Amino acid sequence: MGEAGGMELIYSLVGYPDETEWIEFKTGNNDPERIGRDISALANAAAYLKRGRAYKVWGVEDGTHRLVGTSFDPYHAKGKGNQDLLIWLRTHLSVRASYEFESVVHDGMTFVVLTVEAASGQPICFDRAAYIREGSSTTKLVAGSAKEAKLWERLQSGDFESKVAERDVTLEELEERIDIDAYFRLLEMRRPSHIENAVRFLAEQDIVRLQDNGRFSITNLGALLVGRSLASFAGLRKRAIRVISYCGRDVLDKASDNTFDEGYALSLPAAEQHILTLLPQSERLDGAFRRLEPVYPARAVRELLCNMVIHQDLADSYSALTVSVFDGRIEFSNPGASLVPTEYMLNASPKSRNAALAGLLRQMHLCEEQGSGWDIVVASCEARHMAAPRVESEEDLGTRVTLYAGDAYSRMKKAERKDAAYWHACLMCARDDAMCNQSLRERFGLDASRKNTVAISRLIKECCDDGIIKDEDEDVGDKYRRYLPFWA
């Protein structure tokens, strides 16, 4: 890893506000049994959270995240019976356990990074017992618990897209189960006149597979993309897009409930059009003409609908894709927590749970280029001077993004103004620029009056005090100050 790479990783990990289920910090503690239990817990927690790796770092205070160094040396430490620690751990951990210790020396201090690969196939055990992380604590994985059942489900889920949705389908039945014409039309390809040649193209993209008995299997990817009815595939009944509208601001009075049951290449445009018809309209002047348009940016609605589909946890057989339209807000909910911390979503490296599905939807021009989605949503809201989108992500509850109607700065709550300022700073940073008083005023649609300038200066100071943005250069005068998000 080297000093540069090791410290880059450590700085990245200490940037999280607290210890998580996949990160642990220690200054000392070389108890071999504790280390063995932690390796088991971290491997299983990484698999449970659908992360590739988990980490334990010695040399960092777990409360303050201050770098203090450590005297722990895994290469000379001993296990029970005075056996070398590394050999002792191998004899007490599952043979499938994969982990690595690395020492990093920086500024005269030594740090030790333990990288633990996520469990695969079955839980990792220490002394024949499986452990898991609960918050920042290591505990035994309780047999028969809901958490153990969920862990096993995820350990055995593998690549959901490549699994088979239906077997033993005849050539004639294929066209009844998937829309082959739509597949070629959306990819702007001419369909071969003979079904056998068309199926060859489908097999190349793993939409279908030829079985040894001469019949075909339809993959989950094929059914999710161009299936004629997702409900007709046993494992995909919860994967349809559901759009619910309510009469008020809560769920007490439902106005409509529509399910779009076709594969996403077919259902995404239909669901988007339906959502736009449910949204209230506002009048906009276009030269001499007055035009009606939805109160929410259509591009943001489209992008959040697509993100909901391509970032969902397909292995979750309990939760559904849901769009909920309320008076004053619209919510997009999908199973599965965000793969990146929510505060880094605008500038993070793109990640997708369902790469094959996302790739084909992009080829069909149904979603934007990878990594641009959140930028588009934030920029669309800024162009309308709306409140920033709100994103909530928890492992058990999934991910929910909320758009709010209205564009008046004076009606925004203080928390909404701070959120808008933070995302504006992120957006400016993504453009290789920085936020200033003028750019934030323009983001809110405010003029350059002294009253507005002072109000925005006060908002910027509060955001700096909260630690969500920072000065680009602390030495410049107040008039020329520019600001970056806290992580930049």
Image (cartoon, grey):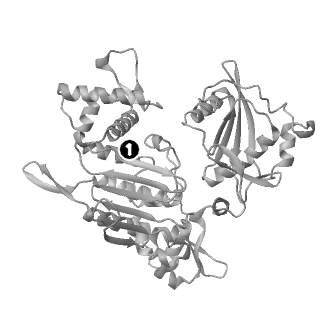
Number of dots carrying numbers: 1
**Farthest residue in the front direction?**
252
- Disc 1 marks a residue whose amino acid type is Asp
1 left or right, relative to 181: right
| Residue displayed at 25% across by 32% down | 441
Instruction: Establish if 115 lies above or below 260.
Output: above
122 left or right, relative to 166: right
Of residues 418 and 385, the one nearer the viewer is 418
Residue 460: quarter of image: top left
Of residues 256 and 96, the one nearer the viewer is 256
Percent position of residue 346, x then y: 43, 42
Instruction: Establish if 395 lies above or below 163.
Output: above
Percent position of residue 148, x then y: 67, 60
Mark 1 Cα-neighbour bin, 10 Å: few <14, some 14–19, many ≥20: some
| Residue displayed at 55% across by 69% down | 220
Residue 219: quarter of image: bottom right
